[in-house]
Image (cartoon, rainbow, N blue to C red):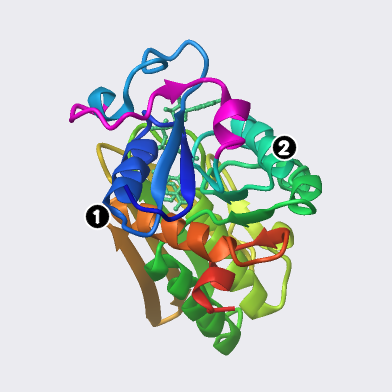
Amino acid sequence: MSNGPGIVITGASGRMGQMLIKTVLDSDRAHLAGAIERQGHDWVGRDVGEAMGGTANGVIVTDDALEAISKAQVVIDFTAPAATLAFAALCAQARAVHVIGTTGMTDDDIANLEPASRHAVIVRAGNMSLGVNLLTQLTKKVAAALDEDFDIEVIEAHHHHKVDAPSGTALMLGEAAAEGRGVALKDVSDSGRDGITGARRRGDIGFSAIRGGDIVGEHDVLFAAPGERIVLRHMATDRGIFARGALKAALWGLDQSPGHYDMLDVLGLS
Ligand SMILES: NC(=O)c1ccc[n+]([C@@H]2O[C@H](COP(=O)([O-])OP(=O)(O)OC[C@H]3O[C@@H](n4cnc5c(N)ncnc54)[C@H](O)[C@@H]3O)[C@@H](O)[C@H]2O)c1
Ligand SMILES: O=C(O)C1=N[C@H](C(=O)O)CCC1
């Protein structure tokens, strides 16, 4: 076992939970200190290695989040908004770094993280991959260089289990485009077109979501003008990119003062 910081993974049985556990177990810079699942889940009480179909590693899945978090330096959390708010309060109490990958959080949810971020480090991003975070910066630059003759559309595709839309990544890209244009996304966002919508409003930033099969995550930012189009694209083919980004954020967070950070801070891209 590594001597590095102890990391607890929430949502241990989930698609990202399992990828995060593998990533932490493979790392020589941290060790797996706990695995949390929701009350009533059939993994609770089982060795997480065995539950994942491999060999036992001595970490027993628990639904006692307070107990698990109080023994860890970091919590990596890719679950659901209500669960993430509860984990934030526990991380603040334990002064543990809270890396949040959960998407679908409302503006109110995000505001409700503020008290926790006064006591502990929070690193939160709708996408923890290097590629997407770089793409946000490219999107901002292109949006700043072009005028409203270029219609901006964010098109995303994900697996059929995904419960939120637009994706967290799509919103990050939309925010970046809006920032480049010097406008607030909430004033120009157009998502969920259906029926007689009327013509596209000049200056709007549109969102379209595809859900199907096992698509890990694909995002296009389209700049469409009369006679020409520019497309910036990111394609994820392996959830390992998100887990490696989350581990990087976890290690980075250990050296920071309490506050609410994002992956641009971690990657030095802001
Ligand atoms: N930021 C990123 O880079 C990134 C990448 C991938 C996924 N995500 C987001 O991560 C989240 C999870 O995605 P997923 O595909 O792994 O979903 P999933 O449904 O496979 O896993 C979610 C897990 O959380 C568990 N959970 C829910 N409530 C809980 C609670 N109160 N306590 C403990 N565990 C609880 C569920 O039982 C489940 O195992 C989603 O919001 C998704 O959009 C973010
Ligand atoms: O699988 C998911 O769910 C993903 N969620 C994030 C998002 O909402 O953008 C990142 C990509 C995968």
Between 75 and 154, the one lying in front of the other is 75
Quarter-wise, where is residue 129 in the image?
bottom left
Q: Is residue 198 visible?
A: no
Circle 2: residue type: Ala
| Horizontal side of residue 262 vs 164, given as left or right | right
Magenta residue check for 74: no
- Our reading of the magenta stretch's main secondary structure is loop
**Please, what secondary structure does the residue beneath circle 2 have?**
helix
Separation (CA) of disc 2 from disc 1:
33 Å
Callout 2 crowding tier (Cα within 10 Å): few <14, some 14–19, many ≥20: many
Quadrant of the image containing the C terminus: bottom right
Mark 1 — residue? Answer: 237
| Residue drawn 61% across the image and 79% down it | 148
| Residue drawn 47% across the image and 45% down it | 7
Q: Is residue 111 above or below residue 258?
A: above
Specify the segment rendered in magenta.
Answer: 52-71
Mark 2 — residue? Answer: 89
| Horizontal side of residue 179 vs 134, given as left or right | right
Q: Is residue 228 visible?
A: yes
| Residue drawn 73% across the image and 39% down it | 93
Q: Is residue 14 above or below residue 215?
A: above
| Residue drawn 39% across the image and 64% down it | 220
Q: Position of residue 16 (x, y in %)?
A: 37, 41
**Please, what secondary structure does the residue beneath circle 1 have?**
loop
Callout 1 crowding tier (Cα within 10 Å): few <14, some 14–19, many ≥20: few
Q: Is residue 52 above or below residue 178?
A: above
